[in-house]
């Protein structure tokens, strides 16, 4: 892969570019240090992101949608745990149109449509909550993070949404948008000087501001507990077991990622897949996952299985976790997991949009865009002892189990 | 050992607009089709598309194509169960397979490695899996009575049954399955691809083996390689690795055509949910009828795709209190006739109003044709889709596989762009009127209990 360049715009916005010739579409991603972590009411960050596409001083929401769609410009804005991401992808010839709209929504949004947007969001959450898996995740997250901003879930958003005022959203956005706490990542068939000149013109007026936000500490889980949700017509039980793990810039994070790969994230050959699916026929989906955020990490194991299998599935989790804590991973198995993880990185860096995502994400989260290249060496150094250590350090802590099933299976 | 390698009997080149080199297509003497597409980069995609799916099933074997797809991963004479996954995933490969009405396909995407080492190994393992599966009894699991399942040893039959259960819990999937069943009376498309628990629990291994022997023949195989590979070397590797035991040629299957629908059909079910789900479906042209397929695609974009479309703007964005939570449309392409859908989620107390509103929007299509602006937007979107589908080796592979199996030739791809350039608003109008006819609508609704 070509290397990338980082240059600062005059106001301090970090511009990250990589020229990939012979690619038909240019990706522009803007990452703003913001998101769920900074909000004092669940839903503010999402509403902010959504409202950025709902009207500016000179364009209403339909005009924005029409102008984007008429040139097949993809633009979406998402509020994640630690950032707001504006994703734009378009044919090379449409760069000026794409930049014009991107700048307009970032700098001139009115947030006038807030009441309408709340109604739409409420409706969409209602649909999400008709999925049993979402209900079980909702219960897990609320119970692991409680009142912390990371405890945002579909049901907590439904509760606080009516209270959110337009001024709060405007303040949230204005306090978030600060030149040195954001980056713009441009990947595609374009020269860095050309794009820099265009961006200076469009985004040069964004100022540097003091960061007014603070994030409370995430409390450790005070006890291990099981929370349940009764759904009488569920054909499968939805079972999650979650632990708090290391934060994104902790040295342990990458070790836990490799542990996660070999336990339940490599694809069809992970331990959970082989033991619980191939050998015991318990599930179609069984996996583990680990997400590392700026102020917390969340490790979890998931299975969807016939409700009468709840006990045997949980025992299966226990056996696999215990094995990781007591037995050193075979060198070959560890090597396979590392190669799986690194090989898949190539798969997730194939398009301009994907490359732009990782460079911008590592930058905004504080690891630096160069982390994308350093990762390989860090993975290579991991030993069987490291895996056992992180298993003992994190998976011996209290955990929360969230189960959805018909009532009689929950007793 | 000397191998009797199949010779090339036909060869063509097709120019893809966003790829650096023309795509090469070879037909081998044994009937096996090979397609090689060059794409710069470290990743390579290896896949084989088999021209069988639920279209070749009946009530007694419903779900067999998909169950077979699972069992193909259970080992060969050379490699034990799970070894394929383990060896390739240890190299960072993404390995999987999918079954649909017209096809089943198996793929590996991985970094090709130094001197193509990993690519060569992936191709060898993939070919071995495709031509020499052994279907061990213990991996399939003992047959059992689905209504009375007290089986200790749960194996792959149960994995598929869990997959069926999972789908029963997904409201959109439930609504779609009911609709699919409602839309067909005669054609095998009426069967759900995943089948039923009863059949999966009890089907005999011998039936699975027979099905494999009947359909997994070279003439039904299209093997596709996408990546930075040498064409001649790759072709030789494929010939060397795909040595078929079974080269029998079957007569081309004939399917009972679906009689023309003449009036609206409706089905309503309930579940423990809080919102209303509905899908309205129409029989659309055959995927091979390119101009008509493109016209329906353009209607779909104008009506129900993206935020600027009519349904989203009129029914969600404009009303102060919309009765819809989500709305959209799409076309599924099938060899024996596409389907055009409008999917919607609404406040359950407004069910009748929701369905009537959609019908009005469809009538509006006839009263006010799609506009010049909508027409140009749809054209641009379809063109940009070609750019987007050329960005990854997997998508290029999937695109080629689709054209080869559903559209039955790669020239569809080139013709597609030509037709798109020449189609007129009036063409779109006439074709839409023919297919998206409210007298031929099928409606499936899922409501809270």
Image (cartoon, rainbow, N blue to C red):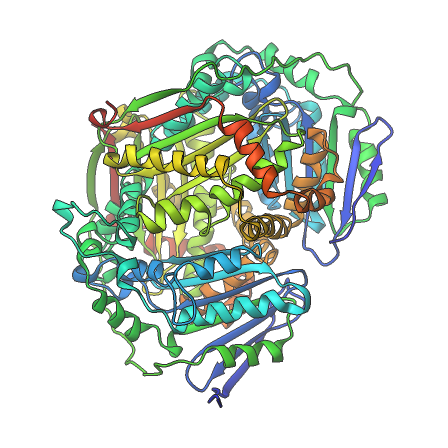
Residue B350 in the figure: left or right of residue B21: left
Residues A189 and B438: in front is A189
Residues A86 and B128: in front is B128
Residues B256 and A277: in front is A277
Could you tell me which residue is drawn at 57 percent across and 16 percent down?
A218
Q: Position of residue B356 (x, y in %)?
A: 29, 34
Q: Please identify the quadrant where the C terminus of chain B is shown.
A: top left
Q: Position of residue B325 (x, y in %)?
A: 39, 29
Q: Position of residue A187 (x, y in %)?
A: 72, 46
Could you tell me which residue is drawn at 64 percent across and 49 percent down?
A349
Quarter residue B289 falls in: bottom left
Can see residue B323?
Answer: no
Could you tell me which residue is drawn at 72 percent across and 37 percent down?
A99
Q: Position of residue A389 (x, y in %)?
A: 58, 33
Can see residue A294?
Answer: yes
Residue A317 in the figure: left or right of residue B147: right
**Residue A146, above or below A187:** above
Could you tell me which residue is drawn at 55 percent across and 23 percent down?
A46
Residue B269 in the figure: left or right of residue B30: left
Q: How many marks?
A: 0
Residue A4 in the figure: left or right of residue A215: right
Residues B42 and A239: in front is A239
């Amino acid at each position: 892969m070509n290397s990338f360049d980082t240059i600062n715009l005059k106001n301090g916005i970090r511009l990250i570019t990589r020229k990939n010739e012979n690619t038909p579409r240019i990706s522009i991603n803007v990452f703003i240090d913001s998101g769920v972590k900074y909000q004092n009411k669940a839903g503010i960050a999402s509403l902010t992101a959504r409202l950025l596409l709902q009207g500016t001083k000179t364009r209403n929401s339909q005009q924005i949608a029409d102008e984007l769609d008429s040139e097949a410009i993809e633009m979406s804005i998402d509020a994640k745990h630690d950032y707001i991401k504006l994703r734009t992808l378009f044919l090379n010839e449409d760069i000026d149109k794409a930049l014009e709209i991107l700048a307009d929504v970032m700098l001139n949004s009115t947030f006038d449509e807030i009441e309408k947007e709340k109604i739409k969001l409420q409706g969409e959450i209602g649909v999400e909550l008709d999925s049993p898996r979402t209900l079980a995740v909702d219960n897990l997250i609320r119970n692991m993070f409680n009142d912390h901003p990371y405890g945002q879930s579909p049901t907590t958003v439904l509760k606080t949404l009516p209270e959110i005022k337009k001024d709060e959203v405007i303040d949230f956005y204005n306090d978030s948008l600060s030149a040195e706490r954001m980056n713009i990542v441009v990947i595609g068939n374009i020269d860095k000087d050309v794009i820099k000149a265009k961006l200076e013109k469009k985004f040069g007026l964004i100022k540097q501001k003091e960061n007014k936000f603070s994030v409370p500490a995430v409390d450790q889980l005070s006890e291990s507990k099981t929370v349940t949700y009764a759904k009488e017509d569920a054909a499968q039980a939805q079972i999650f077991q979650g632990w708090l793990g290391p934060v994104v810039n902790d040295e342990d994070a990458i070790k836990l990622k490799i542990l996660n790969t070999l336990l339940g994230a490599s694809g069809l050959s992970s331990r959970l897949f082989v033991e619980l699916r191939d050998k015991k026929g318990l599930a179609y989906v069984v996996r583990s996952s680990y997400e590392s955020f700026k102020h917390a990490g969340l490790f979890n194991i998931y299975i969807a299985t016939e409700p009468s299998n709840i006990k045997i599935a949980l025992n299966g989790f226990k056996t696999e976790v215990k094995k990781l804590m007591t037995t050193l991973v075979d060198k070959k198995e560890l090597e396979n997991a590392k190669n799986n993880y690194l090989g898949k990185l190539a798969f997730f860096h194939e398009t301009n949009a994907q490359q732009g995502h990782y460079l911008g994400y590592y930058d905004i989260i504080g690891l630096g865009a160069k982390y994308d290249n350093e990762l390989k060496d860090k993975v290579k150094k991991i030993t069987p002892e490291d895996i056992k250590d992180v298993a003992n350090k994190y998976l011996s802590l209290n955990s929360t189990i969230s189960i959805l099933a018909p009532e009689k299976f929950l007793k | 050992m000397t191998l009797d390698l199949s010779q090339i009997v036909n060869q063509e080149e097709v120019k893809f607009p966003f790829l650096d080199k023309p795509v090469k297509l070879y037909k081998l003497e044994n009937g096996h089709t090979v397609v090689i597409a060059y794409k710069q980069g470290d990743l390579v995609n290896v896949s084989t598309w088999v021209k069988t799916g639920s279209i070749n099933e009946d009530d007694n074997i419903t779900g067999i194509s998909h169950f077979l797809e699972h069992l193909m991963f259970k080992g060969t004479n050379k490699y034990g169960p799970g070894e394929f996954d383990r060896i390739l995933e240890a190299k960072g490969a993404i390995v999987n397979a999918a079954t649909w009405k017209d096809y089943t396909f198996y793929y590996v995407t991985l970094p090709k490695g130094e001197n193509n080492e990993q690519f060569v190994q992936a191709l060898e393992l993939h070919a071995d899996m495709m031509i020499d599966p052994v279907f061990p009894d213990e991996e399939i699991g003992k047959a059992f009575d689905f209504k009375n399942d007290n089986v200790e040893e749960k194996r792959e039959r149960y994995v598929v049954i869990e997959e069926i259960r999972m789908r029963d819990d997904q409201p959109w999937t439930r609504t779609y399955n009911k609709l699919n069943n409602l839309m067909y009376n005669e054609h095998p498309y009426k069967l759900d691809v995943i089948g039923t628990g009863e059949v999966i629990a009890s089907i005999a291994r011998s039936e699975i083996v027979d099905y494999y022997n009947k359909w997994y023949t070279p003439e039904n195989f299209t093997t596709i390689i996408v990546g930075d590979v040498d064409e001649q070397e790759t072709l030789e590797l494929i010939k060397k690795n795909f040595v078929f035991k079974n080269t029998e040629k079957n007569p081309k299957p004939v399917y009972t055509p679906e009689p023309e629908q003449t009036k609206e059909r409706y089905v309503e079910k309930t579940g423990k949910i809080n919102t209303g789900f509905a899908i309205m479906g129409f029989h659309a042209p055959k995927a091979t009828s390119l101009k008509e397929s493109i016209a329906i695609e353009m209607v779909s974009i104008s009506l129900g795709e993206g935020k600027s479309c009519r349904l989203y703007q009129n029914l969600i964005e404009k009303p102060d209190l919309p009765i819809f939570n989500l709305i959209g449309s799409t076309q599924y392409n099938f060899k024996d006739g596409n389907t055009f859908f409008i999917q919607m989620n609404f406040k359950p107390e407004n069910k009748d109003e929701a369905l009537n509103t959609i019908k009005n929007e469809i009538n509006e299509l006839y009263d006010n044709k799609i506009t010049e602006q909508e027409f140009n937007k749809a054209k641009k979107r379809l063109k940009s889709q070609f750019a987007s589908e050329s960005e990854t080796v997997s998508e290029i592979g999937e695109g080629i596989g689709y054209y080869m199996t559903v559209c039955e030739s790669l020239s569809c791809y080139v013709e597609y762009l030509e037709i798109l350039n020449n189609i007129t608003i009036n063409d779109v109008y006439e074709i839409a009127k023919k297919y998206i006819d409210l007298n031929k609508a099928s409606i499936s609704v899922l409501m809270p209990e």
